[in-house]
Image (cartoon, grey):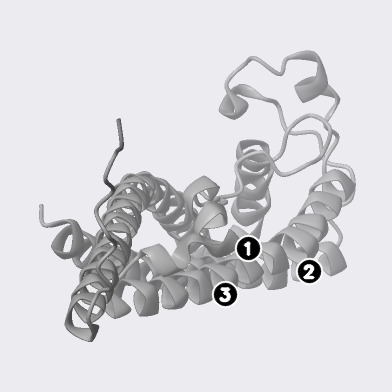
Amino acid sequence: MEVHHKHHVPKNIKEYLTEFLMLFAAVTLGFFVENMREHYVEDHRGQVYAQRLLEDLKEDSIRLDNVYNSAEEKVRLITSVMPFAQDEKKIMQLVDSFYYFGFWNYNKYGYVASLPRFYRVEETLNELKSGNLRLIQSDSVVANLAAYSKKYMTLSQVIDDYWQERSVNLTKLHMKMFDRKYYLLHENDHPKTFPITYRDISKENIYTLKIELLSYRINMEALEQNVVSLRKINYRLMNHLRAYIKI
């Protein structure tokens, strides 16, 4: 029994063109769908980073308040004792105030214990810097983030300058002028209950004390100003982030 095969009819140019257009459309559509999917995924990741950054900035804001309050307290303490420096009859009140004031600021090993320091939360920032900053599709957020980082470096430098110079000078002066043995034996007592035992309260050391306390106050006032500036950028950046993630 013979099997009759249908003869293959050659396609005309119109059919080839139709198949090509259909294939091209399918490939193009797939490309656009994949592109849209990647864009959605990256936009979602950008939103997640923005939310995390917002939470970090809230924590930074609390830390900045603590630093400001600490610096403000120190400025207030220094300002309250400086009038004694202008009156020779009250100069020993300045010396005694420094004795007690020193124990509020130094631990038993002579190092600064209550220096106001600020460390921002950096985990999210570090991830963004590693190549993910492009996911934040907001020029205002990126610009303010750069300004925030720059001002943070300025604040850190102000604190480091104090740490490296002023704190060392004050510590050495305090240990030179007073005997700290009682504190070493009664470190859990309230500092204002410590008896004052002088070691060297010469005119030279008292003069140095005046200069150091004035410099101390200047450092703390500079710290306050830089904290205020950083808080403003922090607040502005948080507002841009809220607008970006629409909350």
| Classed neighbour count for the residue bearing mark 3: other residues with Cα under 10 Å, few (<14), some (14–19), many (≥20) | some
Instruction: Determine the residue positioned at 89% across, 50% down.
Output: 200
> Can residue 224 be seen here?
no
Asked if residue 89 lies left or right of residue 233, the reply is right
Frontmost residue, 6 versus 1? 1
Asked if residue 232 lies left or right of residue 74, the reply is left
Element assignment for label 1: helix
**Residue 66 position in % (x across, y down):** 41, 46
**Which quadrant of the view contains residue 214?**
bottom right
Disc nearer the start of the sequence (1/3):
3
Residue matched to label 2: 208
Element assignment for label 3: helix
Identify residue type, mark 3.
Thr
Q: CA distance from mark 1 to mark 3?
A: 9 Å
User: Where 199 falls versus 237 (above or below)?
Assistant: above
Disc nearer the start of the sequence (2/3):
3
Q: Which mark is residue 233?
A: none
Residue matched to label 3: 154
User: Where 187 falls versus 180 (above or below)?
Assistant: above
**Residue 207 position in % (x across, y down):** 76, 71
Asked if residue 247 lies left or right of residue 75, the reply is left
Q: CA distance from mark 1 to mark 2?
A: 22 Å
> Can residue 141 be seen here?
yes
Q: Which image quarter is the N terminus in?
A: top left
Q: Which mark is residue 159?
A: 1
Identify residue type, mark 2.
Thr
Frontmost residue, 27 versus 184? 27
**Residue 227 position in % (x across, y down):** 42, 65
Query: Is disc 1 in contact with disc 3, using a CB cutoff of under 8 Å?
Result: no
Disc nearer the start of the sequence (1/2):
1
